[in-house]
Amino acid sequence: MTPTLRELTPEQALRHLELLFTRRPDGLLQGEHASLVPGPGSEISETRPYVIGDDVRRMDWNATARTTVPHVRRTLADRELTTWIVLDASASMDFGTARMEKRDLAVGAAAAVAFLTERAGNRLGAQITGPYGIQRIPPRTGRRHLLAILQAALDRPRVAPGVPEHTLAEALHALRALPSGGLVAVVSDFLETGWEQPLRTVSHRHQVLAVETVDPRELELPAVGLLTVVDPETGRRREVPTHARRLRERYAEAALEQRALIRQSIRRAGAAHLRLRTDRDWVRDIVRYVAAQRRRTGGGAA
């Protein structure tokens, strides 16, 4: 059985994540950011000479006629990419009842984005929320920098109940002034409020992938008698009589409504949406997502 990140030292966890995504499972993870979001990028940047294999639908006939050499339109997705990972480190992420906690799943998702967008010239930066402010890691190139970001994600402190947190909305607000045309991956459970409008603002200027982390106990309660639950954000405790079937049904219904609202809000913001669960093989789910995006954009399946 594959160990979880919690069962490994930070150094082992980094090596484990690197192996997962440099092996490129199933031949699908090819380091193309267009595979992570729906569409290869359509904003016109410039033209360049045609090379064998280019999509003829992108031929720039004006440039071709002017230069007598075939040219194609180059889009922003063809250029060096700047990727930002916005990682939610709020108290609600320190929860998990299955294979791992949501914080571990979030690091895995961040690693997937980092390694899949790694390519010569591409830059990677991060915004990590937490109790001591938002940790901003400026974008740079290189494998060493990529691993430093994942190390910071692994080392982020847990939030004590009642300690004020810097929110996901604040981390997204900080990206408003960035040059347009990058990729922003937001990894969160999206349980806090106030992120909808900032996400929409970021989506107007960048391609955005929202990775939602979910634990099964957030979707349904087990029948285990009197259960003590603690709000990780406030530390408030409450006794819940889980033996009551109607209570469990109402809980499941409310959870489904909440997740549906999160999904709708992400889509209304114009972001792509990937849901990962702590009780599933998250690497396989990412592979399937990338394969689906490649098929959608005409890249086919490996």
Image: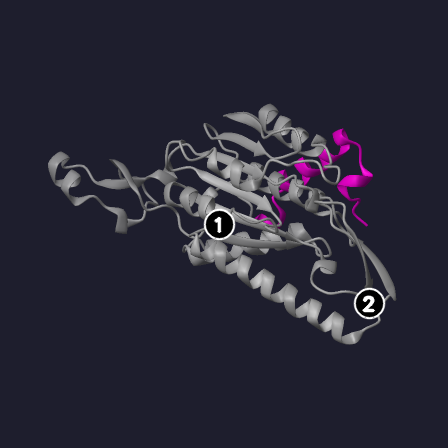
Magenta-drawn segment: 1-27
By secondary structure, the bulk of the magenta-drawn segment is best described as: helix
Residue 147 horizontal/vertical position (percent): 63, 28
Residue occupying image coordinates x 42% and y 35%: 176
Residue hosting label 2: 242
Residue 1 horizontal/vertical position (percent): 81, 50
Residue occupying image coordinates x 48% and y 52%: 272
Magenta highlight on residue 58:
no
Q: Quadrant of residue 247?
A: bottom right
Residue occupying image coordinates x 73% and y 46%: 232
Circle 2: residue type: Thr
Residue 132 horizontal/vertical position (percent): 65, 28
Q: Is residue 191 left or right of residue 280?
A: left
**Residue found at the far left of this picture:** 66
Residue hosting label 1: 196
Q: Quadrant of residue 179?
A: top left
Q: Is residue 106 left or right of residue 172?
A: right
Q: Is residue 157 left or right of residue 73?
A: right
Marked residue nearer the N-terminal end (2 or 1): 1
User: Quick check: 255 above or below 111?
Assistant: below
Q: Is residue 117 visible to us here?
A: no
How busy is the neighbourhood of tag 1: few (under 14 within 10 Å), some, or many (20 plus)? some
Secondary structure of residue under mark 2: loop
Say if mark 2 contacts mark 1, CB within 8 Å.
no
Residue occupying image coordinates x 57% and y 48%: 27
User: Quick check: 32 above or below 215?
Assistant: above
